[in-house]
Amino acid sequence: MDNLIETIPGLEWSQIDKRAFEHDGCVVDVGCYMWDWSNSLIGKKRIVGIDPLEENIPNGVEMFKGLLGPFNCELPVTGEGISLSVDNHSDDVTLKKSQMLSWKTFCKKFNIGKISILKLNIEGSEYTLLNSMDTDDFNQIDQIAVSFHDWLNPKYKNLTESSLNLLKDSGFKVVSIYEPYGWYLATKE
């Protein structure tokens, strides 16, 4: 654990392996709202952010203002900030819509091959996203920093266990970096 650094000094949940700076991939920050997690990496690595609400786009950062998920579509969303959620059950035609891209479509659109760090903080959608990815996708990623949201919704506990096993089966060593908010760091072995 001596090789871990914090992207936000003093906040354990922001830990990554410092080898990310030597790895020739980019950083994909999914749930980049307010840029707190990846701010210290801007200018040091290519950064692609994904968030349907983020308005402030720092210089030198690429942005997809939408959602990342298991398929390509447009979805109705409700809420603001970290309380944003997809609303699949409402008949309200006035709801905001957000474009969702699949992982493969997103990577193709932004010409992404190797990924030094994939950061996921997407309020429970990390489960479907990870399970939509295949071996080729995981082989392109060196590190995954993820917040599993079973701390917020205990019904997600089995999904967290399944996702942790998926990461391990995909060649990652997984460690808990901040248990109160379900943060894990998965690094390729």
Image (cartoon, rainbow, N blue to C red):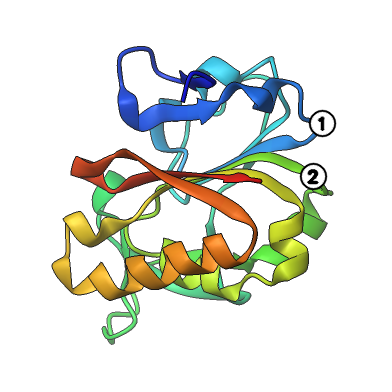
Question: In the shown orientation, is residue 10 left or right of residue 98?
Answer: left
Q: Residues within 10 Å of mark 2 (few under 14, many from 20)?
A: some
Indicate the amino acid at tag 1: Asp
Circle 1 sits on which residue?
24
Distance of label 2 from label 1 (alpha carbons): 7 Å
Provide residue 150's location: percent of width, then percent of height: 23, 61
Looking at the image, which residue is at 47% across and 38% down?
Answer: 32
Question: In the shown orientation, is residue 33 left or right of residue 136?
Answer: left
Which of the 4 image quarters holds residue 44?
top right
173 or 132: nearer the viewer: 173
Provide residue 30's location: percent of width, then percent of height: 51, 47
Provide residue 51's location: percent of width, then percent of height: 48, 47
Which of the 4 image quarters holds residue 156?
bottom left
Provide residue 75's location: percent of width, then percent of height: 46, 73
Is residue 128 visible in the rendered image? The answer is yes
134 or 129: nearer the viewer: 134
Q: Is residue 20 above or below residue 63?
A: above
Report the number of discs: 2
